[in-house]
Image (tube, rainbow, N blue to C red):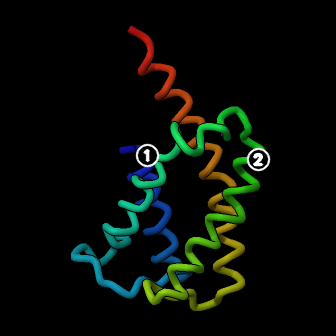
Amino acid sequence: MLKCFLLGTLIDTVLMQAGIMVYASPNPVSFLSPLWMSLLWVALAVTLNHSLAWLKNKYGLSAILGSITGPLSYLAGVRLGAGSMPDEINSLVALSIVWALSMPLMMFWAKKSNKSSYEI
């Protein structure tokens, strides 16, 4: 969960600093993405060894699904007023690339952490 928290904070901060995402709620640390965004990455991390466990060892499929569902979740947040995308098309393309890379990485971490948790 910590790796996903750090990854999400890094990604969302870069997206924010690049002007790809603008968040509606300010963060006490102005140069970082909002804490609630980082916590959403933790919530995702909790699902990786449970409801998303079927994606383990399917890195290509997790990249494809990540490239679709990741940007759609950001778009849903924008539509609900949590932020904005100044250039929606370019933002969605950037998010698609980020999530196509991030999802397989997180699945790899989940697989690795799950394996080590059973070793005594």
- Badge 1 crowding class, 10 Å Cα cut-off, few under 14, some 14 to 19, many 20 or more, is some
Left-right relation of 86 to 35:
right
Residue 108 x %, y % = 59, 35
- Badge 2 crowding class, 10 Å Cα cut-off, few under 14, some 14 to 19, many 20 or more, is some
Amino acid, disc 2: Leu
Q: Which residue is mark 1?
A: 46
Secondary structure under the numbered disc 1 in the rendered image: helix
- Residue ID at (47%, 28%): 113
* On screen, residue 35 above or below 63: below
* On screen, residue 13 above or below 110: below
Q: Which residue is mark 2?
A: 61
Quarter of the figure that contains the N terminus: top left
Indicate which disc, 1 or 2, sits on the residue closer to the N terminus: 1
Q: In terms of image quadrants, where is residue 30?
A: bottom left
- Residue ID at (66%, 71%): 94
- Residue ID at (73%, 38%): 58
